[in-house]
Amino acid sequence: MLPEDGGSGRTSPTESSHQNDRTTAPETAAAAEPGNGAAGRSASHDRWWLYRGTGQPLRDTDLGELLPPPPPWRRFTGGPVVTPPPPDDEEIERRLGRISPSSVGTTHLRHEADMVNAALLLRRPLLVTGRPGTGKSSLAYRISRELKLGRVLRWHITSRSTLRDGLYEYDAIGRVQDSAALSALRRTTPPDAGDTSPATTDEERLPGIGDYLQLGPLGTALLPYELPRVLLVDELDKSDQDLANDLLSVFEEGQFRIAELVRARRMHPRVKVMADDPGRSADIVDGVVKCRAFPVVVITSNGEREFPPAFLRRCLRLRMPDPDRSQLVDMVRAHLLQETSEPRKKAQADSLIDQFLLSSRDRGGLARDQLLNAVYLATSGRFPGDEEAMEDFVDALWHRLDGAGAESRAG
């Protein structure tokens, strides 16, 4: 059954499996909970549980207090420190639903939390694989919400994506056009007879070079923030084969050069450029962007191709299995709590979850948003047909992800 609102007394996914599978006493995990005192947070063992996968943001603390120093080979010292990122609660709620406690954890949820914590402590990218619709991209937003790391930077990969796309864009054509327009203006505007100052060059009258530069999601993630940004590199397997190799040096060095600023660094050693965050900018010194806190990098792949061994060696790997019933219940509750609050609608949602699990098994796997679509329509009270018509419509919604069988039984 769908759980009632509240969920008090539930055990978090990692706490439950911690009690069952770890040799440490259960009270150790409880002491590690944010807000339970400095003694619990200071224990080195408890520092493992930075991310718990509970869906609950940290309380009375932040990641800066909990995260230990990086390994010596992953230490970065970029500067000047950039202002913390803006929150994006609206986008996170759109993707994850309302904040609500998760059900008792499964082995996979414990493993997921373990891999996220390993990535945090080692400052390494996390490569997340699995079928489409299993929640790979959502992991980045769960990490950001729970650790209070602000807006998620998303880089959606296509077959045409290059490393430069993720780092920055330079509008060279726009700068040339502006320069030509200023030159034409000077030729048509008579000089002021009373102006005895030296003539201003077009270069001096142009907007600064930073006005023609904008950092991409990857470039913004590598700015010197005090706390790590969350970067989602979505569907990397759709890229050209060279992109994974191109990412290696950036992930290893934690920095990159902006060629246009390097060439201009004598005249412009410090340049303000636009960031990927709306309305935000950052100062770049000597044309080099160098991180301070290595970002939390979540790379997703649907398994359409393999990656080079050197790339895989530098990533931690997590495979997302199909969601089980408790995870689907939590998802429906987070997104559609109000729509399923009545007993009749809650029973409809329960029935659809069970049907979804069977259909997903028979059809080679379905996506979680296909279930949300069906539950929303069924519980909205707006569908005009009878129960049989609804079954036909749900069958059409739950088409195979490879495109086969998309037509409804009603034709």
Image (cartoon, grey):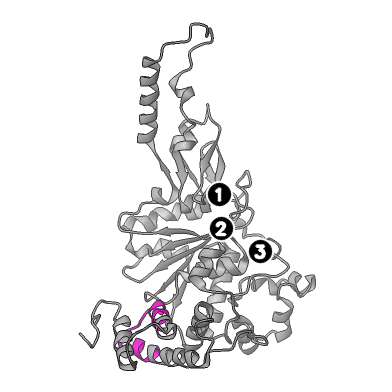
Badge 2 amino acid: Arg
Q: What segment is highlighted magenta in the picture?
A: 357-374
Contact? badges 1 and 2 (CB < 8 Å): yes
Q: In this figure, which residue is indicated by the disc labeled 2?
A: 229
SS state under label 2: loop
* Percent coordinates x, y for residue 169 in the rendering: 41, 44
User: From the viewer's perspective, is residue 140 above or below residue 210?
Assistant: below
SS state under label 1: loop
Badge 3 amino acid: Leu
Place residue 306 in its image quadrant: bottom left
Res. 63 mark = 3
Badge 1 amino acid: Leu
- In front: 286, or 337? 337
User: From the viewer's perspective, is residue 182 above or below residue 363?
Assistant: above
- In front: 227, or 349? 349
Separation of marks 3 and 2 at Cα, in angstroms = 11 Å
Q: In this figure, which residue is indicated by the disc labeled 1?
A: 223
Please check the rendered image and state whether residue 385 is part of the magenta-colored stretch, yes or no. Answer: no
Residue 25 seen in the figure: no
Q: Earlier in the sequence, mark 1 or mark 2?
A: 1
- In front: 57, or 136? 57
Separation of marks 3 and 1 at Cα, in angstroms = 18 Å
Residue drawn at (39%, 32%) of the image: 175
Q: Earlier in the sequence, mark 3 or mark 2?
A: 3
Place residue 80 in its image quadrant: top right
Q: Which quarter shows the C terminus? A: bottom left
